[in-house]
């Protein structure tokens, strides 16, 4: 491998490890109330959302069918009763751009696992939790990525528990499961370090390994290409990070924009924004055999 000591670049692959859920008691939310938000046709740095405004001000109260909500344009919207269909999916205008509220009772305080499908996010007893925005169906073709991997632990209180789902995808399903054990692993969202088949690059929590070179840190971002095993012409683009900071850093680069120039592989940290070649830990091009030793790379 030809390495010149001058540039700094980061090559990372961040694999996320989450809890694997095995179902105990299962409960599916089938009834609720929903409200449609006014659609905005222009971009804004500030989101205009009257429901979130009430939440932030501590003034939000659980809605009932027929309750009205004042909107930012001096109009009002109404909460309506909604029911899930035969396949326990909520659909309709409010689920396309609005909120669905549901109340779930519990006879004791306990932890449940929420699998939200189709929601952008959800407030559970006032606490914000991730949704499953792209999981909008029950079955997938063999070639499709499975987006139904969200398994979110939520703390139930004894009595009423409040779920407020933000929806924009036109469908919503919410499944609650009792965890089978105190500690579980989510096999649908494995984040343990992984090696691309036949490749010389390994990215894990806190490090990137490229051939014989190891770069350490939890703030590294990484982009690289590898040949697709089942194709003679196609490649796989990898966007990775060695930690939360590294993954956030990948969002600062428009790597999906046409014409944005990148080498075959680059590893960098936040210092790259200071210019002068700073922050680039490793960068370069693989050889004709897709090897590192046969390629040309520079590193700090």
Image: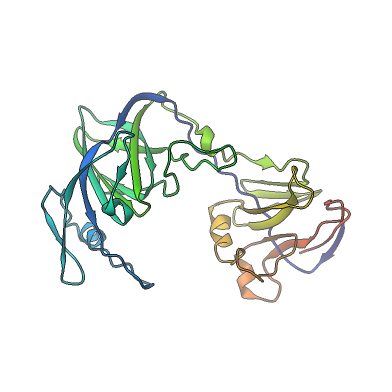
Up-down relation of residue 185 to residue 43 (above or below)? above
The residue located at (34%, 44%) in the rendering is 172
Q: How is the image coloured?
A: rainbow
Q: Nearer the viewer, residue 240 or 35?
A: 35
- Give coordinates of residue 267: x percent, y percent: 69, 59
Left or right, 142 with reference to 167: right
Of all residues shown, which one is farthest toward the left?
66
Left or right, 203 with reference to 284: left
The residue located at (71%, 43%) in the rendering is 196
Up-down relation of residue 225 to residue 278 (above or below)? above
Left or right, 219 with reference to 135: right
- Specify the quadrant of the image occupied by residue 297: bottom right
- Specify the quadrant of the image occupied by residue 41: bottom left
- Specify the quadrant of the image occupied by residue 257: bottom right
- Give coordinates of residue 249: x percent, y percent: 57, 61
Quadrant of the image for the C terminus? Answer: bottom right
Picture mark count: 0
The residue located at (74%, 40%) in the rendering is 197
Q: Nearer the viewer, residue 144 or 4?
A: 144
- Give coordinates of residue 144: x percent, y percent: 56, 42
Quadrant of the image for the N terminus? Answer: bottom right
The residue located at (26%, 53%) in the rendering is 94
């Amino acid at each position: 491998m030809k390495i010149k000591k001058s540039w700094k670049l980061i090559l990372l692959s961040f694999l996320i490890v989450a809890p694997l859920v095995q179902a105990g008691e299962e409960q599916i939310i089938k009834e609720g109330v929903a409200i449609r938000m006014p659609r905005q046709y222009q971009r804004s740095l500030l989101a205009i959302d009257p429901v979130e405004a009430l939440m932030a001000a501590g003034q939000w109260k659980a809605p009932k069918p027929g309750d009205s909500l004042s909107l930012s344009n001096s109009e009002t919207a109404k909460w309506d009763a909604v029911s899930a269909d035969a396949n326990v999916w909520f659909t309709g205008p409010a689920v396309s751009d609005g909120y669905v509220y549901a109340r779930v009772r519990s006879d004791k305080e306990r932890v449940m696992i929420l699998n939200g499908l189709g929601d952008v996010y959800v407030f559970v007893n006032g606490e914000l939790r991730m949704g499953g925005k792209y999981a909008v169906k029950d079955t997938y073709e063999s070639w499709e990525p499975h987006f139904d991997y969200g398994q979110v632990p939520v703390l139930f209180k004894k009595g009423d528990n409040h779920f407020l789902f933000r929806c924009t995808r036109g469908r919503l399903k919410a499944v609650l499961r009792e965890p089978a054990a105190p500690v579980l692993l989510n096999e649908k969202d494995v984040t343990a370090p992984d090696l691309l088949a036949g490749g010389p690059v390994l990215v894990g929590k806190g490090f990137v390994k490229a051939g014989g070179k190891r770069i350490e840190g939890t703030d590294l971002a990484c982009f690289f290409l590898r040949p697709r095993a089942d194709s003679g012409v196609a490649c796989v683009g990898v966007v990775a990070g060695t930690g939360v900071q590294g993954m956030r850093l990948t969002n600062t680069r428009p790597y999906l924009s046409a014409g944005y120039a990148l080498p075959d592989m680059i590893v960098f940290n936040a210092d790259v924004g200071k210019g002068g070649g700073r922050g680039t830990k490793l960068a370069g091009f693989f050889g004709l055999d897709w090897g590192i030793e046969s390629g040309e790379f520079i590193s700090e």
